[in-house]
Image (cartoon, grey):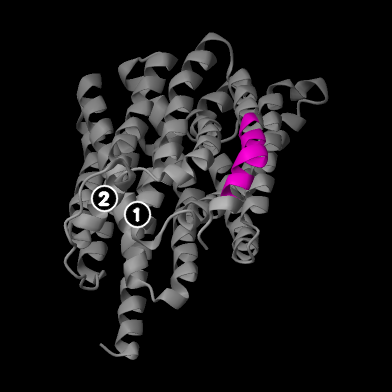
Amino acid sequence: MSLENDEKLFNSSFIAACSANFLYFFGFYSLLPIMALYLIDTFQTDKIITGAVMACYTIAAFMFRPFGGYLVDKLNRKKLYVIALAIFVLCFEGYPLASSLLLFVFFRILHGFSFGALTVTANTLVIDISPAKRRGEALGIYGIANTVAMAIGPMVAVYIQKYHGYHAVFYMAFILGIVAFFIGTTFIKAPKREPVEHQPLSWDRFILFNGLPAGSSLLLLGIPYGLITSYISIYSKELGLGIDSGWFYSLMAVGMVLSRIFSGKQTDRGKVTQVIALGIFICFIGLVLLGASKYGYVLSTSIIPILFNFTALLLGLGYGMLFPAMNTLFVNLAPNNKRGTANSTYMTTWDIGIGIGLLFGAQIGDTYSYSLVFFLGAFAAVVSIIIFVCYVTKHYERNKLR
């Protein structure tokens, strides 16, 4: 195949991959501001049960992650993508049809499994269809599609839920998912791969051991992220704000887009660890201010909504710097034939942190307050930056392969 044909294949398949990615993540992010409230209003769950049900999704995704890299390297990636996307989309329809909490939990777990498979497979397909010289650019644009979906999806969902109810949000996500499925299965053309030779199973096929030190730091950062993405709507009510939680996610997404532009250039210049350390510090400041929003009335009642929204932008800046730089760090610690393992280890440690945040955050918030929950998230960020600066940075400099 000529270089010109290669470029045409990349352009058409990449546009399709980004479009499908935007649509199904739009549906996914649409559920963030309404899911916890839906459980409470529909099944009369308390905050602890709500947290446990929310955590099922992340736990299920986590259970797939260690096998993700191996399966994606072993099986037909396009077929795995199609199957994972189909199940992922169908779960949007399953939520409003669930007549009991048990059935809802079933769909939540199934959604998590399919999400774990879909994200690993879709990212690998983007690498497959991208020319080597444009791979970094392609992954950056592909990631921005997620962020834009995060900026718009929650706001649209809050508006639809307010005027048309919860089920309308689920049906919207389902319809968008169907369009994503059509685009992804029809227009993404995966290049042919050489047959994979049989390799004996071993632990290093599933876990990048060199990445575990960085994984411990990333895990701690996942805890407050899980709190932010799942309990902001409840915390907003606790503060008595007349602000839609969808606006918080949108401001957070704006911060992520802005910081990706800066952090990507700095990471390409070799400042991987510096970008990560700065990102963690910004997240710490944002989490402290978020927890302190409850006490803003000491200065002025008008400062509470300002502080609340400012922290969204700040947290977006911090996490937006972390994601691409931390992913690069994991890949740089792995040989070329274990990039899938590096990515799955990166995602696994992140999922564990989010799951911990979902599970224990609800218990603490229900017993005490969600202000305390976010202060504890700030403490996790402090421990994370200590581990990263004192150990991970030195480990990375000794063991990086590129």
| Cα gap from disc 1 to disc 2, whole angstroms | 7 Å
Label 1: which residue?
Answer: 340
Q: Nearer the N terminus, badge 1 or badge 2?
A: 2
Q: Is residue 112 depicted above or below 356 in this figure?
A: below
Q: Which residue is drawn at 26% across and 65% down?
A: 183
Percent coordinates x, y for residue 296 in the rendering: 75, 25
Badge 1 density bin: few <14, some 14–19, many ≥20, Cα 10 Å:
many
Give the overall secondary structure of the magenta segment: helix
Q: What residue type is labelled 2?
A: Tyr
Percent coordinates x, y for residue 262 in the rendering: 65, 61
Q: Residue at x 61, y 34 (%)?
A: 384
Percent coordinates x, y for residue 81 in the rendering: 23, 56
Magenta highlight on residue 392: yes
**On the picture, is 356 further left or further right than 240?**
left
Q: Which residue is drawn at 40% across and 44% down?
A: 345
Q: What stretch is highlighted in magenta?
A: 383-396
Label 2: which residue?
Answer: 70
Question: Residue 196 falls in which quadrant of the image?
Answer: bottom left
Question: Residue 45 falls in which quadrant of the image?
Answer: top left
Q: Is residue 368 depicted above or below 307 in this figure?
A: above
Front residue of this view, candidates 370 and 347? 347
Q: Which residue is drawn at 48% across and 14% down?
A: 363
Magenta highlight on residue 273: no
Mark 1–mark 2 CB contact (< 8 Å): yes
Query: Element type at marker 2?
Result: helix
Question: Residue 372 falls in which quadrant of the image?
Answer: top right
Front residue of this view, candidates 52 and 387? 387
